[in-house]
Amino acid sequence: MDSKIKSLNDLTIALHLINKKYKIENYIEAYKKAVGSSSMKILEDLKMDTTSNPFQKIISFSSKISEEMIESMIAATAGLSGYNYEEYLEECNSLREVFLKDRKTYFSSKVVFNTNKKKDGTSNIFELSGTADLVLGDFLDKVLAKIYPAHLDVVYENLVGEKVKTRLRHRRSAITIEHVEAPLIDRYHGINAYDSFLLRSYYDAKKNEWIYIPIRLIMKVDCDQELLEEIESIN
């Protein structure tokens, strides 16, 4: 497999191939049968939950799972054979690491993580849960609101690997009888945690419309020098 992942869409395609290689769909079905219907009720509730952030979703349902149920699920799945799930996770993680390593100079990487520092378990959870994307996305929202009507010049990589230059400006929601204008609902790209990246909408002052930006693929953010003090005062 090519170790060079040229775009986020390429990462997703590569993960699809890994899923096929390790027969993950078959593993999931075998897992469901092993843990039983009572546990599946919790998983179905988790799937139906409308919380956009997967980390918040997991937390909201964690209280429903008792220690006895966890022990029962572990015991039931211990007998599953023919599936190397740990190796599958390692291969998925390796692809994501290659993808992000090639983008370590991006603005998002420098802001979210010190790229010279080895990630520990906490930072991996922080990133894979989508929390890192949310933190950076919320910060940009605050910056745009603070400097309005000024704008930010942003360069980002889109889903197919193209570099896009745009100009973002805060835009107030407007709701009338004839017209509704508001940010688009947050979306998550990907098929699993390893290619899951937040797509958040911002108002494109060039196109005069809301556009989705993959937060983790923001390459550069610039503004007028006199706005820096305002930005630095944001908590």
Image (cartoon, rainbow, N blue to C red):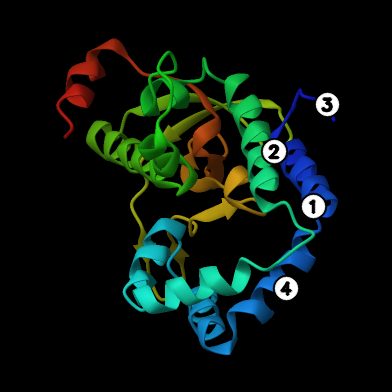
Which mark sits nearer the N-terminus, 4 or 2?
Answer: 4
Sequence-earlier tag: 1 or 2: 1
x, y percent for residue 61 = 38, 73
Mark 2 residue type: Glu
User: Looking at the picture, how far across and down is residue 214, in whole percent?
Assistant: 55, 39
Q: Relative to residue 21, is residue 206 depicted above or below? A: above
Q: Gap in Å between the C-alphas at discs 4 and 1?
A: 13 Å
The amino acid type found where label 3 is placed reads Asp
What whole-number distance in Å separates the C-alpha atoms at marks 3 and 2? Answer: 13 Å
User: Which circle marks residue 22 in the picture?
Assistant: 1
1 or 3: tag closer to the N-terminus: 3
Label 4–label 1 contact, CB within 8 A: no
Q: Are marks 1 and 2 in contact (CB under 8 Å)?
A: yes
- Looking at the image, residue 233 sits to the left or right of residue 56; the answer is left
Front tag of 3 and 2: 2
Give the class, few, some or many, for how many residues have Cα within 10 Å of label 3's Cα (few <14, many ≥20).
few
Q: Are marks 3 and 2 in contact (CB under 8 Å)?
A: no
Identify the residue at horizontal 74%, vertical 28% (top origin): 5
Residue type at mark 1 is Tyr
Q: What residue do we see at 45% from left, 47% from top?
A: 130
Which numbered disc flags the more N-terminal residue, 3 or 2? 3
Cα separation between marks 3 and 4:
31 Å
- Give the residue drawn at x 39%, y 46%: 131
Tell me the CA gap for discs 4 and 2. Answer: 21 Å
The residue that mark 2 highlights is: 91
